[in-house]
Amino acid sequence: FQSESMVRRQFIQDQWLSGGSNFIVWETAAANKSNHASVSTPATEYTSDEDDDFADDVSEITCEELAPPVLLQENQKSELELWDSLCDNRIQRLGPRNALTAEAFVNRGMAQLEANRLEEAADSLLSAVCFLEEVHHSEHIHMGLVFFLLGKVYMQQEQYPMAESALAKALSIRKKHLGKVHPDTVECWEQLGMSYLQRAAQMSLADPETERFLQKQALEILTQVLKLKRAIFGSLHPSVAKTARVVARLCALRNEMERAQRLYKQVMAVLYMVDKDESGKINPDYPDPSETQAKQMRRQNLNEIEAEMVRFGLKE
């Protein structure tokens, strides 16, 4: 089984995640593969126009054996050991072609990602892809989560083309099942844009032309994300401000100063409002350490944004 699993994981990785030098190259190759849907490129999908707005038999398995372990937030090693034990148990008792087995591997991959054990996380998640394909199909909604997590793993490993391929697959699945205006879909979109942005920074010295292209792709994607977040959360949500700040920085880098300044001002207004509201909840006689820390982080963010504006010549 181990040999078959390793071959299958390599097949999945080669088939879905080894996209060439950019997302468009990968999409062209993926579109030519039979039995697999292609994914739209950012150039056609994303616009910067401001006006657009488990059926297996488990009767002999006890509930105790199937129950997921209690997550130990303060002891990652113990948590990972528990997930390892559960994965081994489900492989032995249920086999790989089972949704509960796949679920255990997904959760172990999440725990490994949280613990920054990236190689192990990638292995667990690719195993989950194999298992889920045996139970469901390649476009099942659960696949969206697994490919999204794989994208995050590859981003942390700075394997950006592979990250973009995984995130594009997750985005395609989530759009199909959830629609565009859904937090999980938008989360994929945003992560994809951030991957382009981080890859652009990596290319800044080696290939300035590619850097500009990737920045343009990131700007188009994150502009779409910003509009969708405003539709879902409202203009005054901190998550909207976070994305608006990234878009503002990109605009400044591309010399779109008027738009950058407008966005920076919107971000500052939201953060000042949030800081005022949250600071009013703090009891000066019995301050909560977590609330005090959150306040310090908000002030730090405001100072960083002001420094960015000064650096770009948007504020004296």
Image (spheres, helix red, strand yellow):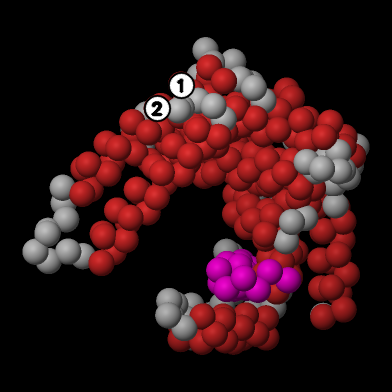
In the image, is residue 284 above or below residue 252?
A: below
In the rendering, at what x and y percent does residue 163 appear? 73, 51
Residue 165 visible to the viewer? no
Q: Is residue 87 magenta?
A: no
Q: Which residue is mark 2?
A: 266
Q: Which residue is mark 1?
A: 262
Q: Which quarter of the rendering shows the C terminus?
A: top left
Question: Where residue 192 is drawn, which disc sits there?
Answer: none
Q: CA distance from mark 1 to mark 2?
A: 6 Å
* Residue 174 placement, left or right of 26: left
Given contact means CB atoms under 8 Å apart, are the residues at marks 1 and 2 in contact?
yes
Q: Is residue 101 magenta?
A: yes
Q: Which quarter of the rendering shows the N terminus?
A: bottom right
In the image, is residue 248 above or below residue 202?
A: above
Tell me which residue sits at (17%, 64%) in the image. Answer: 287
Q: As shown in the figure, which amino acid type bears the numbered disc 1? A: Arg
Tell me which residue sits at (61%, 83%) in the image. Answer: 84
**Which residues fall within the magenta stretch?**
98-119
Tell me which residue sits at (21%, 65%) in the image. Answer: 288
